[in-house]
Every structure is written in structure tokens, then in C-alpha cells.
């Protein structure tokens, strides 16, 4: 199958990223809240910065987790890390913390409801998925439109979140013989942003 | 600029990945050996597995580092981790440890010298870079050919390594207004493999 992918200039888009720690699934498909992983903070902020994302929301319902992340961010935003690594400061400066997706929507999108786009590695029989190509084209046609791209920690976003989404992106397919799909969320975010915005 | 990218079926390629911890540069451009980062082991193995890479070489000249990584790998390959997370076992089972790039070449490529491909985020004035498109096409035309894709930790691969390479890939460009290029090596590997082998 040979298809065309436009290598358009995607700068100036209005898509933000949210990493959801609740409600997400665990291995047994229970709905749980996960802890924040330090590398998720750094890697996803750096990828977001690279691809022109304006804000990276870390969504966690556990207050202690948000306090912990805030203290860590202070090190890089205003503490010794800011002097030692200004590039990291630039990336981490775009992080916003929120308790839930609704808080993100109410606080940061009070004027314009964003198009909410879910990602999921698993299959949902009968559910239509949006292709990366289509979404890239749509964003190119209307860069001003507010959009929010959601990633789940653990074993993925719970149904409660999916129901609030306007679109679900197609799963990332690689090139393994047996369709192995167990990327880290850090890799998944990086690949999604590159497919949507990368210049190559 | 609109160009075509073929979405070919890249399964069955013969490219391996190596993560180089020596000789690499630090912030001051000194040549150093870096320590292994736990998330580099997991994330890069999972991405490699997803994109049909056969072997993921972790190259570190410090013996204690290789002992440490081996002990950690045992947990996932034959210890409790193998039972708890068989998908992780599948990914980490492809990791090979080596002291230097030369050891990789002598031990694993004794019959056929691979095409060695470097990656680098920084610019080298006057040096011709291979585009992702070109390399993808070349691999598609000759999938059997052994290839080794190198990534540097720290601030990137040292000149000693670059001199041994047949090609240097173009840097990953995102969509930020000021060409921000400070991805983690985990993100860089994921994006490179997706550009070379991803099905979308």
C-alpha cells in the first residue's frame, strides 16, 4: 500500500497534550489512579516543546502527587535546574497540573471547548478510529482550533474518559511480525506528535 | 512543501539498534562515558520490538555498568518479571550488552559488515545527511542488508564513532517556532524507528 502523506508546515497549531493518571485501567482492567513517573514529566515536556505544543497537562487526582510534581518542577523552573539547564526549563515551563480532565476543561478552556482526541493502543471493535493522516490534514486546515490530545498511563484511558472524546486516534502500528504494541507512554506521545506535526 | 512518503510494509527488515554510552560528548564537549539509564533499557527495547528490530545493543565500556544491567535484565528475562510481564520479557530478551562498538561489529557481524548509520540532533556544516525518506526507501529495496542504527547518550556521539559510520541521518525536526531540538534519546529512537518502519 502506497499512500501520500503531506509534509506540511504544521507550526502555529493549537493542540495541547494531557497525560491522564485517573481514571485509567490497570492490568486487570480495574479503574485506578496511577502515580506520576518522573520520566513522563521530562520526556513528554521535551517532545511537546519540540512539536510546538503550548501546554502539557499532568492530570492526577491524588493531591500528594501534585504537590510532589510541583516541588520537582520548581527545581527546574526557578531553582538550580533553571540555571544549569535552560533548555529543560523551557520545556518544563509549559507544564500545568490539574486534578481531573474536567478541571482542565473548566479552567483552561472556559471560552472555547476544545476538540478532545483520545489515544489507545488497544482495539475497540466497531468503533471508528481517526487516522493520523486525517487528523494532520484537519489540523492543517484549521490550525486555530483548540484541541486536546489525551494519553492514558497504566493500561490506558478508562471508558469514562473515552466517552468525553470527540475522536479516538488509530493505534500506533509498527513493523513487528505479530503486531507487538507495548510502547511506553513516552514513546507513544513522541510518535503521535511526530506523525501529526513532524517536518520530514 | 508537499511530498510523498510511501507507507510501505517494512516488516522483515534487518536493522539493529545500538545505544552508545562511550565515546559520547558531555555538555562541555568533552568525551565521556555515561551511565545506563533504566528507562533507556525498557523504552528503547519496547520501541525496537514494536518496529521489528532484531537486536538492541547497549554499549558501555564500564564493566560495573554492564554487570548492573545484566542483573536487572535477569529479573525480566528469567526472574519474577518474566512471569508478571511476559510482554516486557519479549522486549528485553532482544538486548545484547557490549563494551564497545568494535565488539558489536566483531562479535555480531563477523560475516557481514553492516551499514552503520549515525543519528545526531546537532548540525554539522558541510556534512551531507541522509533523509528518513531516502533511508526508508533504501531499506525497502534491500531488506536483507544488515544495518546498525546508532544513538548517542549524553550530548551525542563523538567524532570517533561518526567516522566509522556510512551515513548520518538528518536531525529530527519538529514544529516549534525556534527549532527546539532537545528530545530524550528514548523519544528520538521511537520517532526514528517510526519514520523508518511505521505503518500509517
Image: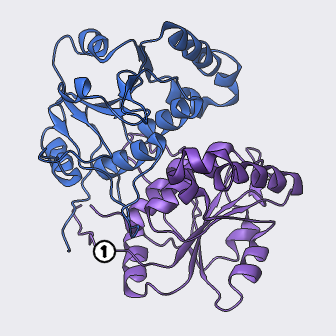
Chain colours: A blue, B purple
Which residue is at a point 20% across and 44% down the rendered structure image? A124
Q: Give the number of marks.
A: 1
Q: Quadrant of residue B150?
A: bottom right
Residue A171 left/right relative to B20: left
Which residue is at a point 44% across and 24% down the rendered structure image? A94
Q: Quadrant of residue B22?
A: bottom right
Which residue is at a point 35% across and 55% down the rendered structure image? A199
Residue B49 visible? The answer is: yes
In the structure shown, which secondary structural element does the residue marked by tag 1 occupy? loop
What x and y, as percent, mark residue B152?
A: 66, 57
Residue furthest bottom in the image = B111
Name the quarter where the N terminus of chain B is drawn: bottom left
What x and y, as percent, mark residue B11?
A: 38, 74
Q: Judge whether A92 appears above or below A128 on screen.
A: above
Q: Nearer the viewer, residue A4 or A199?
A: A4
What x and y, as percent, mark residue B109?
A: 68, 84
Residue A99 left/right relative to A144: right
Residue furthest right in the image = B63
Q: Nearer the viewer, residue B93 or B21?
A: B93
User: How packed is label 1: few (under 14 Cα within 10 Å), some, or many (20 or more)?
Assistant: some
Name the quarter where the C terminus of chain B is drawn: bottom left
What x and y, as percent, mark residue A80?
A: 71, 20
Question: Which residue is labeled 1 in the image?
Answer: B9
Which residue is at a point 22% across and 62% down the rendered structure image? A5
Q: Judge whether A70 appears above or below A15 on screen.
A: above
Q: Judge whether A7 appears above or below B176 on screen.
A: below
Residue B32 visible? The answer is: no
Letter of the chain that mark 1 sits on in the rendering: B
Amino acid at each position: 500500500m502506497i499512500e501520500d502523506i503531506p509534509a506540511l508546515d504544521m507550526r502555529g497549531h493549537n493542540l495541547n497534550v494531557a497525560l491522564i493518571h485517573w481514571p485509567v485501567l490497570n492490568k486487570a482492567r480495574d479503574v485506578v489512579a496511577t502515580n506520576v513517573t518522573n520520566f513522563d514529566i521530562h520526556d513528554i515536556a521535551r517532545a511537546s516543546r519540540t512539536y510546538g505544543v503550548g501546554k502539557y497537562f499532568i492530570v492526577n487526582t491524588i493531591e500528594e502527587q501534585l504537590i510532589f510534581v510541583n516541588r520537582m518542577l520548581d527545581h527546574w523552573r526557578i531553582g538550580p535546574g533553571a540555571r544549569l539547564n535552560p533548555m529543560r526549563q523551557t520545556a518544563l515551563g509549559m507544564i500545568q497540573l490539574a486534578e481531573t480532565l474536567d478541571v482542565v476543561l473548566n479552567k483552561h478552556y472556559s471560552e472555547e471547548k476544545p476538540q478532545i482526541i483520545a489515544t489507545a493502543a488497544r482495539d475497540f471493535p466497531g468503533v471508528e478510529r481517526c487516522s493520523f493522516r486525517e487528523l494532520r490534514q484537519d489540523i492543517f486546515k484549521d490550525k486555530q482550533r483548540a484541541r486536546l490530545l489525551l494519553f492514558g498511563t497504566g493500561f490506558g484511558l478508562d471508558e469514562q474518559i473515552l466517552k468525553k472524546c470527540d475522536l479516538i486516534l488509530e493505534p500506533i502500528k509498527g513493523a513487528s511480525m505479530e503486531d507487538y504494541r507495548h510502547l511506553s507512554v513516552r514513546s507513544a506521545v513522541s510518535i503521535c506528535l511526530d506523525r501529526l506535526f513532524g517536518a520530514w
